[in-house]
Amino acid sequence: MIQTGDQMDYQLFFEEDDALYYQILQQLIRHHGQRVSEAQLQDQFSLTPYRLHKAITTINNDLMTISNADNPIYLDEPEKGILRGNQITTVALQKVGLIYLQRSLMFVVFEYHYIYAHQSSKTDYMKEHFISNATFYHAESRMKKIIKQLDFSHTVVSKSLTSTEYMTRLHLFQLYYTAYNGIDSPFSDLDPLITMLIDQLKAVFDISYTPTRLNKLSIFLKLWIIRVTGENPVATNLLTDIPQSLVDQLQAIRALLAKEYLINVSDDELDYLYTFLMVQDYIAVDVTRFSPDIVPAANHLTDLFMKNVAAHHILVDPAQLTQLPLRDKISNIHIQFTTFYIEPTTFVDASQVSFFQESYPLFDEVVSSFIMQLQRNSDFKFTAKDATNLYFSYMFALINAIPTAALVDKVYVCVDFSQGDLYTDYIVSTLQAFNNAHIVIEENISDHTNIYLSDFYSSFITQPQIIWQDPPTPTDWGQLADTIIACKKAQD
């Protein structure tokens, strides 16, 4: 049914030395204080001291291009045998990664094949980039091995999506979105047209743009225009029963492209654009508009997930499951997975899962067991990063869709401060902002109370007590969180 294939990782295009430099920077950013033993680096990457110091010099030259006087970014040796990074942030790493990508011969050749082949002959392209025949063909050979490894045009997302062009566009978007997003604008010559298109889409569909959504849409539209003008038709149709009102709205996009860029986009291409807008949450998802071949795949996964939720008995009233908005949220996740799946680059850190495992143990059981079920299914293959991203998606859907009152897994906190309502209400309001662990706030001790929160200890109360005699500090919040987790574990 679904197969995401190998991750579309732009680091695969780095030249050998640049790949080493990038890995050294990654090691620094992962270590506390951005300090790492040079001996460790030499051993890990099989480097001589000479080659390591040559690498450090080159990295510093690269870092100078993204530094300024107010924010110097560099490597130094604060003591013999220790390499230290200074201001090596994730943004700095992405900027350096883009430098390495753009100076890669393999990437230059890749762009010829997938971006510029319709605009320029190979001979002219080589002259423009000062590349000899031998160099071009050697880089092309290496590039094709990467493309084959990634199954660039043939990876199947769903049985109904077998268009090689559709898959090529997915991989192109993943590559450019990951490398450029928020750092630089690829294909800047298209910026004026894209600005007009984005304004037109906003007017037609009443889309609200945040910076991240604007970046994503801009990169998508550029690649869409490039592939259309290169005579690479998408050759698939994901939508059906499109109302005339929507057809009329999409005609405005077609007219703009015909006028400003002299291209005539097909119905399939407008379908492709509209699908992206729906699946990526620019406009409301309407499941009824997807073709019959698409919906069953998403529905099947959603049915399995909802059955898994029911089997774990996490609700006080099981019948309430059908009344909650959970199914719609899960369905949207699966529609994205079966139509326009973009391999995740954020929310993929498996080490962060432990927080949700402790704070939401019931939800964790539901999500973890379902992902394991999918991993055992030979029709459903994904990477470790995909699995982590799915974990967060499912977890957030459960958190946002199921109210605390509906859960069997609740922690009751009685808030009682001696200074009166003014102080009690302040603590209650901060607790509500803190509420990431199914807290039910009580005004009085009851049979349900799990934790008593006050500014004075009471010998009449048998429940665990948290005493805050001053506005809560981070340590106080940590103590409360630990007590909540202990209560949850005791309930299991």
Image: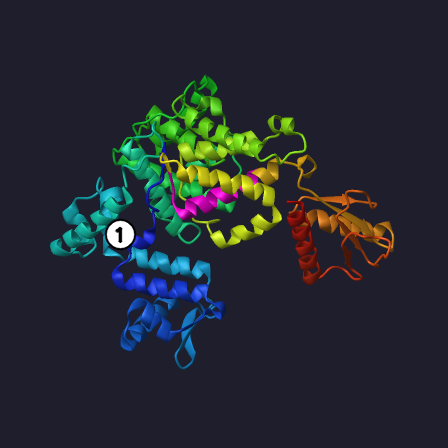
Secondary structure of the residue carrying tag 1 is helix
Q: Classify residue 154 as left or right of residue 448.
A: left
Which residue corresponds to mark 1? Answer: 107
Chief secondary structure of the magenta portion: helix
Question: In x, y percent, where is residue 134?
Answer: 12, 55
**Residue 75, relative to residue 240: is it above or below?**
below
Residues 354 and 240: in front is: 354
Residue sitting at x 35%, y 56%: 98
Question: In x, y percent, where is residue 479?
Answer: 69, 59
Is residue 77 among the parts visible in the rendering? Answer: yes
Residue sitting at x 40%, y 57%: 94
Q: Determine which quarter of the picture holds residue 325.
A: top right
**Residue 183, relative to residue 34: is it above or below?**
above
Task: Report the span colored magenta.
Answer: 381-397
| Residue type at the position of mark 1 | Phe
Is the N terminus in the top left, top right, bottom left or bottom right quadrant?
top left
Question: In x, y percent, where is residue 284?
Answer: 52, 30
Question: In x, y percent, where is residue 244?
Answer: 45, 17
Is residue 202 among the parts visible in the rendering? Answer: no
The outermost residue toward the bottom is: 80
Residue sitting at x 45%, y 27%: 300
The image shows a total of numbered marks equal to 1
The crowd level at tag 1 (other Cα within 10 Å; few <14, some 14-19, many 20+) is: many
Task: Report if residue 380 lies within the magenta region.
Answer: no
